[in-house]
């Protein structure tokens, strides 16, 4: 197996549509709190609006030969977007604005490897490439990752990469991780 990595332009995000929908289905399958909130979450309702509303987007994929087997999607977006987003989930504001000095925040928004490609270091490469991109914005200090309930493996992975649990929202539906 020879894995290589490729940055995908915004015009070509459709190439991860199936994997994005797999990620949503995976998250739903392991979730036990407000599982119904995953209904209606898919590439069209999550990925496309996210890309459109962000100031900057970064999509990197892992390929096994010609097949895309995983991706990480990060963005820089106004912090207000997250408040609006979680408001649609009938959720309180997702973090204390006073603790974030800038208008924009960085987020590792979606991260997924197909079954059979996990625990081999591929995610660590995608994660590092995403962090390198997010950290290239000198004006952005605050990075966030949202992990849905039931995904303790992902929580451990991010904690191993120095992200810390900030708080939970919507009865624990999502755990918010921060870089500070
Ligand atoms: C979460 C996810 C993206 C992590 O990617 P991954 O490729 O499995 O992660 P890695 O292999 O880089 O790292 C996982 C573990 O394997 C270890 N590892 C790293 N390189 C390795 C290698 N070459 N061989 C074996 N193990 C390795 C790492 O140390 C790590 O252990 P740790 O978490 O205790 O530090 C991936 O497992 C996944 O897609 N899971 C399903 C979807 C998901 O949960 N997405 C996250 C949504 S928030």
Image: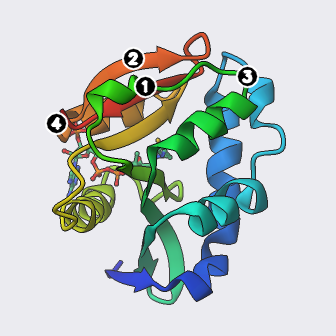
For disc 1, the marked residue is 95
Secondary structure at numbered mark 2: strand
**Label 4 neighbourhood size at 10 Å, few (<14), some (14-19), many (20+)?**
few
Secondary structure at numbered mark 4: loop
Decide which of 85, 63 is in the foreground and name it: 85
For disc 2, the marked residue is 167
Compared with residue 174, is residue 59 higher up or lower down, i.e. above or below? below
Q: Are marks 1 and 2 in contact (CB under 8 Å)?
A: yes
Q: Quadrant of residue 22?
A: bottom right
Q: Quadrant of residue 62?
A: bottom left
Residue at coordinates 43% horizontally, 61% vertically from top-left? 75
Residue at coordinates 68% horizontally, 61% vertically from top-left? 49
Q: Position of residue 131 (x, y in %)?
A: 24, 58
| Of pointers 2 and 3, the one earlier in the residue sequence | 3
Q: CA distance from mark 2 to mark 3?
A: 17 Å
Q: Residue furthest top?
A: 171
Q: CA distance from mark 1 to mark 2?
A: 8 Å
Q: Which mark is residue 162?
A: 4
Q: Position of residue 140 (x, y in %)?
A: 24, 54
Q: CA distance from mark 4 to mark 1?
A: 19 Å
The mark closer to the camera, 2 or 3, is: 3
For disc 3, the marked residue is 90
């Amino acid at each position: 197996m020879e894995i290589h990595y490729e940055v995908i332009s915004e015009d070509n995000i459709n190439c991860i549509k199936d994997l994005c929908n797999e990620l949503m289905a995976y998250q739903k399958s392991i979730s036990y709190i407000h599982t119904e909130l995953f209904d209606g979450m898919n590439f069209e309702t999550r990925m496309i609006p996210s890309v459109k509303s962000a100031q900057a987007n970064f999509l990197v994929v892992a390929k096994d030969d010609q097949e895309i087997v995983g991706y990480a999607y990060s963005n820089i977006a106004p912090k207000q977007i997250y408040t609006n987003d979680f408001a649609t989930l009938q959720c309180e504001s997702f973090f204390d604005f006073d603790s974030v000095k800038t208008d924009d925040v960085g987020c590792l928004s979606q991260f997924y490897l197909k079954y059979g490609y996990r625990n081999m270091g591929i995610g660590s490469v995608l994660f590092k490439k995403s962090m390198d991109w997010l950290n290239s914005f000198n004006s952005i200090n605050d990075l966030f990752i949202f992990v849905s309930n039931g995904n303790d493996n992902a929580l451990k992975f991010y904690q191993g990469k120095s992200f810390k649990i900030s708080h939970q929202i919507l009865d624990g539906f999502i755990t918010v991780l921060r870089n500070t």
